[in-house]
């Protein structure tokens, strides 16, 4: 089966990471995959190292009159059964052809960009319901979840700020927070430093959690504002911005609780990453986490923008190791059943092999 994967996204991001994972997994499974990407030397090198032959394009704005014909010629030479375009910019550049054109969305993007697609794929059931409410019939709108890496055997990161050295005690089934040597518990957040991630709410919640430290791994425009906020609240010695990290599993294994504080989060890959690593999850009830998490079973949900309730839920996990371990184990079971590579890849392969024009 020949599949073209078209990505014009940013250097970092959840959709971009899953694009790479899925492309590589399809290739390993024996499918013929052609990645067509926005110019990005590092992404191209990662795909090439996995045995793929990515082609790079400009994918510019409205005045880019070159990418579309070049992309059309590349697709014509490759002759895919299915061309999957990821997000709006890539979709706008895909010309019509004999292939099945599938637009893959991980958020509530303007659907006018997808009017030429034959089918839409959403990574949450909520997204797919929204497609259908906006006129896409059931036979042309599909739910296919993401998968994340299996961090079950990851070793804890050892280069983190003081607070807990050596990671969580009892890692793995039956494990959970508590242990480590010295310092207070570690709270971890992952994601782009952007206002919709709600890291400011999380920093304010930290003020209600004496002794705990907060690690935020990611980059983005809100970094200076978050640093200032921590200073204003007297938390500069307990809030650490780690920059972009590629070792999510190691970070999760070194921390006691993962927190998704997002104001807006269509899916929440980070929740899946935490489940994979046996790390208990506390999340604000944005669309994605609310769909994913069974509150009180495999994570705790709190109202968005509510620093007091967020602090209360984090404290409940940090103060009850047995409960934290139960949440972590339930999350791990959800990961294995629904969001590990094997079940998700199987679903994608069935879809790609059978989706009609």
Image (spheres, helix red, strand yellow):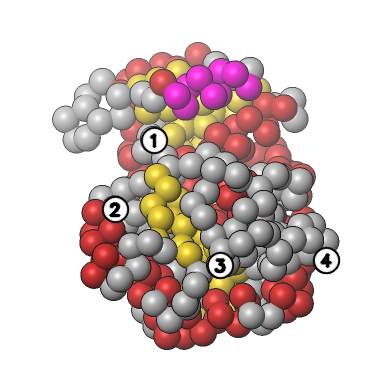
Would you place residue 245 above or below residue 280 in this image? above
Q: Residue at x 69, y 67 (%)?
A: 177
Q: Nearer the viewer, mark 1 or mark 2?
A: 2
Any magenta on residue 54? no
Q: Earlier in the sequence, mark 1 or mark 4?
A: 1
Residue 100 located left or right of residue 296:
left
Gap in angstroms between the C-alphas marked 4 and 2: 36 Å
Q: Which residues are magenta?
A: 42-50
Is residue 261 visible to the viewer in this orientation of the structure?
A: yes
User: What residue do we see at 61% from left, 62% from top?
Assistant: 182
- Name the secondary structure under disc 1: loop
Q: State yes or no: residue 43 in magenta.
A: yes
Asked if residue 69 lies left or right of residue 104, the reply is left
C-alpha distance separating marks 1 and 3: 34 Å
Do callouts 4 and 3 mark residues in contact (Cβ within 8 Å)?
Answer: no
Q: Nearer the viewer, residue 308 or 166?
A: 166
Image location of residue 27, percent across then percent down: 67, 26
Residue named by callout 4: 174
Q: Which residue is mark 1?
A: 11
Magenta: main secondary structure equals helix
Q: The C terminus appears in which quarter of the rendering?
A: top right
Q: Which residue is mark 3?
A: 184
How many marks do you count on the picture?
4
Answer whether labels 3 and 2 touch (C-beta < 8 Å).
no
């Amino acid at each position: 089966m020949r599949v073209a994967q078209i990505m014009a996204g940013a250097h970092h991001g959840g959709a971009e990471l899953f694009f790479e994972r899925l492309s590589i997994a399809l290739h390993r499974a024996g499918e013929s995959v052609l990645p067509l990407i926005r110019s990005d030397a590092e992404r191209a090198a990662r795909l090439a190292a996995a045995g793929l032959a990515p082609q790079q394009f400009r994918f510019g704005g409205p005045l880019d009159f070159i990418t579309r014909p070049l992309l059309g010629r590349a697709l014509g030479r490759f002759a895919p059964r299915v061309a999957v375009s990821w997000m709006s910019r890539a979709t706008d550049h895909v010309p019509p052809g004999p292939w099945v054109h599938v637009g893959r969305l991980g958020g509530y993007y303007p659907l006018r960009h997808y009017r030429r697609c034959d089918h839409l794929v959403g990574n949450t059931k909520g997204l797919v319901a929204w497609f259908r409410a906006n006129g896409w019939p059931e036979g042309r709108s599909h739910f296919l979840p993401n998968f994340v890496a299996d961090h079950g055997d990851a070793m804890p990161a050892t280069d983190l700020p003081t607070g807990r050295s050596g990671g969580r005690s009892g890692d793995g089934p039956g494990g959970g927070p508590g242990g480590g040597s010295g310092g207070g518990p570690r709270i971890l957040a992952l994601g782009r430093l952007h206002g919709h991630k709600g890291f400011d709410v999380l920093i304010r919640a930290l003020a209600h959690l004496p002794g705990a430290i907060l690690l935020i791994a990611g980059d983005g425009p809100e970094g200076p504002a978050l640093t200032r906020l921590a200073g204003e609240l007297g938390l500069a010695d307990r809030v650490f911005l780690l920059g972009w990290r590629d070792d999510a599993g190691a970070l999760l294994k070194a921390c006691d609780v993962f927190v998704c504080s997002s104001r807006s989060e269509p899916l929440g890959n980070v929740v899946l990453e935490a489940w994979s690593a046996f790390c208990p999850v506390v999340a604000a009830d944005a669309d994605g986490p609310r769909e994913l998490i069974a509150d009180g079973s495999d994570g705790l949900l709190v109202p968005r923008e509510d620093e007091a309730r967020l602090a209360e839920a984090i404290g409940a996990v940090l103060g009850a190791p047995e409960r934290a371990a139960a949440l972590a184990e339930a999350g791990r079971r959800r990961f294995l059943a629904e969001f590990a590579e094997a079940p998700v890849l199987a679903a994608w392969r069935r879809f790609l092999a059978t989706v009609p024009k």
